[in-house]
Image (tube, rainbow, N blue to C red):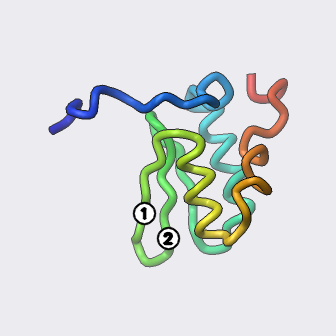
Amino acid sequence: MCGGCAGAPLDWAADLVSGPRRRAAVARRMSMLLRRDTIRAIPSGWVVAGPTGSSVVCRTYDELVEAVSRRSQTAVDDIRHLGLGDPAQTA
């Protein structure tokens, strides 16, 4: 049921990743870690898609970090701040 989940989950990084331009910038920066997978910004998060059509919707920044970590085999702590870039530039 659409809307049955009571809205988007809380995201500690919401101020840094909200809005279409910021989400697109996060997607571009995080995509640098992936060879064959793609990250696409959507109105309420990101979609991480593989070349075989498998995809995962990430509604929070931490979900995106986890998905990229699994697909790139890079430790979460090593990439957590990569997507945020310079906060002065994402404003």
Disc 2 crowd rating (10 Å Cα; few below 14, some 14-19, many 20+) is some
Q: Is residue 89 above or below residue 24?
A: above
Closer-to-camera residue (27/81): 81
Where does the image place residue 51, in percent across and percent down from the top left?
A: 49, 75
Task: Answer with the quarter of the image where residue 68 lies.
Answer: bottom right
**Location of the C terminus (image quadrant):** top right
| For residue 8, side relative to residue 77 (left or right) | left
Residue 55, numbered circle: 1
Residue at (40, 71) in percent of width and height: 53
Where does the image place residue 48, in percent across and percent down from the top left?
A: 51, 58
Helix, strand or loop under label 2:
loop
Helix, strand or loop under label 1:
strand
Residue located beneath label 2 in the image: 50
Residue at (62, 51) in percent of width and height: 65
Q: Residue most toward the bottom?
A: 52
Where does the image place residue 23, in percent across and percent down from the top left?
A: 60, 37
Please state which amino acid type lies under the numbered disc 1. Answer: Ser
Disc with the residue nearer the chain's start (1 vs 2): 2
